[in-house]
């Protein structure tokens, strides 16, 4: 009787040709990012070169970290924050084991380094070239991998399978566009990549989208949104500025300027509008753009403090968003006035901070349904409506304060997601 041939896991030939055709652009972008803020280590490791002298870097000083039994990949800042509670719990439960932690961006690496975790080693994940992924996997000692949210790389997954590294996608997230548009070439690539992967999806909708993308039903479970357990509401000792302020948090290109202009023109509140861009490295560009429109905005990264006559301030730093949320009178959660899909509106809820979002919140459909059902978040159609909400919040409107308290109760309930993940991963 013939021995069954195992299902092939290497990407389809069309995907391999596509990667080969795009390789000059991918290498060029990697070089550009290395020159911009990543450095030589970023360039080398993104191409899969992990020489002995470039051993994984610990996120804290001290003795050499323990051998890595777990590998975690988080693409950038948001994904790092999402997985941090789970990572810290795993380290507590495994006191003699280490973690290899990869990111795709220098800003994600910087957030990890701020945590000062002594048994966590950082590397950059390689671009999805076969040779680069093979070199990465060959020097990875971990037997299991947690991939955060939506990172599906066919070559990487294929080499992990060959190396017997068990992959679990945690907080699995897929947009409707990804699941419906991934047809033809991408559909077969995703289906093959997911054929040996477990998925812990953040919602029923995401579960169904992974299923439509080709993930086996037996490998799929709904575990809840891990992002809702991120940041446990640690309180800052004092406000970061000594003026009443409202917040525009995790903003993207176009959102800062339109909101700053609308806030500059409004006359109902003397509160400061603090803009916290999702990508702090854009600080120079944002300040320059605002200045060209007549708005002088100081920058926290440069040590500026807002003058009494200023009404806009740029908080272009990493790791301080929770402290800004704690003392804000009201907040706009960015990425929602544009078609980015929004960011985590439960973060301000942990501080009972009244929150408004724009019309584009596709990334958080399930949480928006819950918040709207409890009248715990507001939706604005444009920048002027956002400013109207923030001005009302700055005046201490009692209805908005009650809305913030309702959101806080929901945030407290959402902390249970972390326990579910720990239980499912332990199995």
Image (cartoon, rainbow, N blue to C red):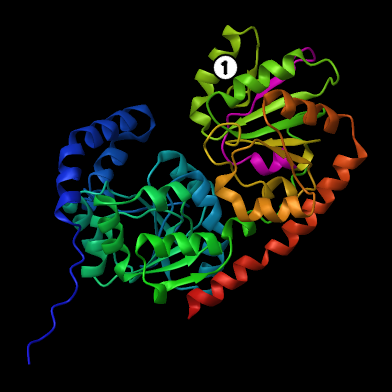
Which quarter of the picture shows residue 342?
A: top right
Give 289 or 306, whichever is nearer the viewer. Answer: 289
Q: Is residue 324 above or below residue 272?
A: below
Residue 242 visible from this viewpoint: no
Tell me which residue sits at (59%, 39%) in the image: 360
Tell me which residue sits at (7%, 88%) in the image: 2
Assign a secondary structure to mark 1: helix
Give 121 or 427, whichever is nearer the viewer. Answer: 427
Along the horizontal axis of the image, is 160 left or right of 149?
left
Count neighbours of disc 1 (C-alpha within 10 A) and say few if under 14, some if 14 to 19, many if 20 or more.
many
**Total number of numbered labels?**
1
Q: In this picture, which residue range is highlighted in magenta?
A: 305-325
Give 48 or 248, whichever is nearer the viewer. Answer: 248
Instruction: Tell me where residue 53 appears, x and y as whole percent.
Output: 24, 49
Instruction: Tell me where residue 309 appears, x and y as whole percent.
Output: 78, 12
Q: To which residue does mark 1 refer?
A: 287
Instruction: Tell me where residue 349 appears, x and y as whole percent.
Output: 74, 49
Which quarter of the picture shows residue 312?
A: top right
Q: Residue furthest right?
A: 398
Residue 348 visible from this viewpoint: yes
Q: Is residue 313 above or below residue 144?
A: above
Q: Is residue 308 above or below residue 272?
A: above
Tell me which residue sits at (69%, 27%) in the image: 274
Instruction: Tell me where residue 21 appears, x and y as whole percent.
Output: 16, 38
Give 149 or 61, whichever is nearer the viewer. Answer: 149
Q: Is residue 319 magenta?
A: yes
Can you say which quadrant of the picture contains the N terminus?
bottom left
């Amino acid at each position: 009787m013939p021995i069954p041939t195992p299902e092939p896991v290497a990407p389809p030939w069309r995907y391999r040709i596509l990667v080969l055709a795009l390789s000059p652009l991918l290498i060029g972008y990697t070089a550009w990012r290395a020159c911009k803020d990543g450095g030589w280590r970023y360039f080398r490791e993104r191409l899969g070169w992990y020489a002995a002298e470039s051993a994984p870097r610990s996120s804290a000083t001290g003795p050499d970290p323990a051998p890595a039994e777990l590998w975690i990949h988080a693409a950038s800042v948001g994904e790092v924050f999402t997985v941090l509670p789970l990572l810290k719990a795993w380290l507590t439960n495994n006191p003699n084991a280490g973690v290899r932690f990869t990111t795709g961006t220098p800003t994600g690496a910087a957030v990890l380094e701020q945590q000062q975790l002594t048994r966590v080693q950082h590397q950059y994940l390689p671009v999805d070239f076969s040779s680069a992924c093979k070199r990465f996997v060959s020097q990875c000692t971990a037997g299991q991998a947690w991939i955060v949210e939506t990172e599906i790389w066919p070559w990487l997954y294929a080499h992990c399978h060959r190396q017997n590294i068990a992959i679990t996608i945690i907080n699995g997230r897929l947009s409707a566009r990804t699941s419906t548009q991934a047809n033809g070439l991408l559909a077969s690539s995703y289906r093959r990549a997911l054929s040996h992967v477990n998925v812990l999806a953040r919602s029923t909708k995401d579960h169904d989208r992974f299923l439509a993308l080709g993930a086996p039903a037996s490998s799929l479970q709904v575990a809840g949104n891990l992002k809702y357990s991120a940041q446990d509401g640690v309180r800052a000792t004092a406000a970061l500025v000594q003026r009443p302020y409202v917040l525009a948090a995790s903003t993207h290109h176009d959102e800062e300027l339109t909101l700053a202009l609308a806030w500059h023109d409004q006359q109902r509140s003397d509160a400061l509008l603090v803009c916290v861009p999702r990508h702090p490295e854009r600080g120079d560009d944002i300040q320059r753009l605002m200045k060209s429109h007549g708005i002088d905005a100081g920058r926290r990264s440069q040590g500026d403090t807002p003058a009494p006559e200023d009404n806009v301030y740029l908080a272009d730093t990493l790791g301080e968003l929770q402290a800004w949320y704690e003392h804000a009178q009201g907040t706009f959660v960015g990425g929602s006035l544009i078609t980015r899909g929004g960011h985590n509106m439960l973060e301000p809820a942990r501080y009972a901070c009244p929150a408004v979002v724009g019309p584009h919140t596709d990334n958080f459909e399930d949480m928006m349904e819950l918040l709207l059902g409890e009248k715990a978040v507001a939706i604005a159609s444009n920048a002027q409506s956002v400013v109207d909400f923030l001005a009302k919040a700055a005046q201490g409107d009692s209805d908005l304060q009650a809305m913030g308290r309702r959101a806080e109760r929901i945030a407290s309930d959402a902390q249970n997601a972390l326990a579910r993940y720990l239980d499912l991963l332990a199995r």
